[in-house]
Amino acid sequence: MLTKLVAKITVWGNVYRERLAEAARRPDRGDISITTVIIWVAAVAGAIAIAGTIAVVVKKYNGKLSGI
């Protein structure tokens, strides 16, 4: 059991070192910029606001909308 744990830790350490080396070789590896995050948050918030508004209108006028 302990041997397997040591082996896994060794493998994880090697993978971690390889990823750090790759990040050092290619600093522009496609990380998401803060601007992209802000745009996505705004888009999701806008979609939620629109859906909420539609839900409120449908709930308020549910009886009157049945004849459409």
Image: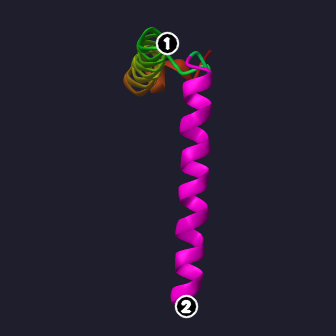
Alpha-carbon neighbours of circle 2 within 10 Å: few (<14), some, or many (≥20)? few
Residue that appears at 61% across and 51% down: 15
Dominant secondary-structure state across the stretch colored magenta: helix
Please state if 48 lies on the left or on the right of 28 as rendered.
left
Q: Left or right: where does residue 19 sit relative to residue 50?
A: right
Q: Nearer the viewer, mark 1 or mark 2?
A: 2
Residue type (three-letter) at the residue carrying disc 2: Met
The crowding category of the residue bearing disc 1, from other C-alpha atoms within 10 Å (few below 14, some 14 to 19, many at least 20), is few
- Looking at the picture, how far across and down is residue 34, in whole percent? 41, 14
Q: Which residue corresponds to the image point at 56% horizontal and 59% vertical from the top-left?
A: 12
- Queried whether the magenta region covers residue 26, the answer comes back as yes
Question: x, y percentage for residue 21?
Answer: 58, 35
| Quadrant showing the N terminus | bottom right
Magenta residues span 1-27
Alpha carbon distance from label 1 to label 2: 45 Å
**Residue annotated with mark 2:** 1
Quarter of image, res 56: top left
Q: Quadrant of the C terminus?
A: top right
Is residue 38 part of the magenta span, yes or no? no
SS category of the residue bearing label 2: loop
- Mark positioned earlier in the residue sequence (1 or 2): 2
Question: What number is the disc on residue 36?
Answer: 1
62 or 49, nearer to the observer: 49
**Of the pair 50 and 8, the residue shown nearer to us:** 8
